[in-house]
Image (cartoon, rainbow, N blue to C red):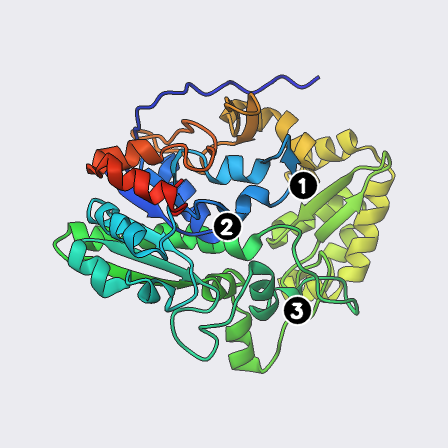
Amino acid sequence: MNPSPPETTTTPVRSGPLADLRVLDCSTMLAGPLACQMLADYGADVIKIEHPTRGDSLRGHGRQKDGHGLWWKMVSRNKRCVGLYLGDPAAAAVFIEMAATADVVVENFRPGTLERWGLGWDRLREANPGLILCRVTGFGQDGPYASRPAFGTLIEAMSGFAAMTGEPGGPPVLPPLGLADSIAGFAAAAAVLMALRHRDAGGGGQVVDLSIFEPMATALGPPVLVYDQFGEVPRRLGNRSANNAPRNTYRTADGSWVAVSASAEPVAERALGLVGRPDLAAQPWFATGAGRAAHGDEIDAAMAAWIGARSLGEVIAAFGAAEVAVAPVYDAADYVADPQVAHREAVVAVPDEELGPLRMQNVAFRLSETPGAIRHTGRRLGADTDEVLDELGIAPEVVAELRDRRVLA
């Protein structure tokens, strides 16, 4: 049985480098909410605004336990939850009061939706000239695709990712996770902090127009540049690389898998020496990464034969002694049990009021003086509505009237 990670110390007190920020998270599903999760992990007071009867679709997305979405518990951690329908004029007026006290609003409605509700940038800026409005959409706020509905899967297809992923001669492959949305979430968090830096240096508020499309394409590296200069597009290579070899996954004698990467010539030379093929390293083509990649069949055959005759433990030990980069291919259970993960507390157990302790990934990076923390998991719909509206001084009769009309939860 694997030892449980240390349980976080739960406290209502926020701390971290962003503890003086208030963020209104009006976004749904993953890209915007993930950006807000990161801000909340480092101390921001993130108030999650959801539809008062439907909630965020992420609540019902992915695996459920006892009717509670596990993805929601992670992505909505450290956030206060308010149910408010922004399309209702009276509820929109409450939102304006909330925005007047906020530093950041994050939304991912189709372009024009906030404007239709009377909550466009002009109105928000009038209420709060220092506000940062981060608008996350599939393709951006303008252009011929601006009004298209888009999920990360479509972006992974259109960015070029799927076209270069998969086995040679096989179909394009999509990732089994929210890759494009996750990259956009990290990008949105960075963009918000840049905009806040500008504001705090004497500038005003501004709009962050973030498409999921562009960060995903940026993450792919140089394919556009290669196409521009050579007219070539990447081919699907499976686990191989067009830039170097050996670079692949190989099966061990006991049925495990390892990944090997030898980008630098000295490392590749040690790898071929280890597996008993120094003759390949002596070939003229071995001197360049492109040359090694062009002879990937020969190199892979040598690596696969040697690794396939040995156990995982033997392979890891031999590669380590030869100073050649190798790693076992982990699943989630392997990751949780790994001693480096345990040492870094990269997985922590967080108490949850509905499901008990939940093990999840810790904050994404470490700051020596102002560390982030997980204070609580994603909460129930409307769990903090009364507290938040009371802080704003919203009259109890207004709250009651909005609840009666089901535009507040």
- Amino acid identity at mark 2: Leu
> Which residue sits at x=80%, y=61%?
297
Secondary structure at badge 1 equals strand
Farthest residue toward the bottom?
A: 231
Farthest residue toward the left?
A: 202
Query: Is 107 left or right of 72, judged from the image as shown?
Result: left
Mark nearer the N terminus (2 vs 3): 2
**Residue nearest the observer in this picture, 83 or 201:** 83
Q: Is residue 331 above or below residue 142?
A: above
- Amino acid identity at mark 3: Ala
Q: Residues within 10 Å of mark 3 (few under 14, many from 20)?
A: some
Q: Mark 2 or mark 3: which is in front?
A: 2
- Residue 339's image quarter? top right
> Which residue sits at x=63%, y=43%?
62
Q: Quadrant of the C terminus?
A: top left
Q: Separation of disc 1 and disc 3 at Cα?
A: 27 Å
Q: Separation of disc 2 and disc 3 at Cα?
A: 23 Å
Q: Horizontal and vertical percent for residue 14?
A: 31, 28
> Which residue sits at x=50%, y=18%?
7
Note whether residue 79 is visible.
yes
Residue where numbered disc 2 is placed: 30
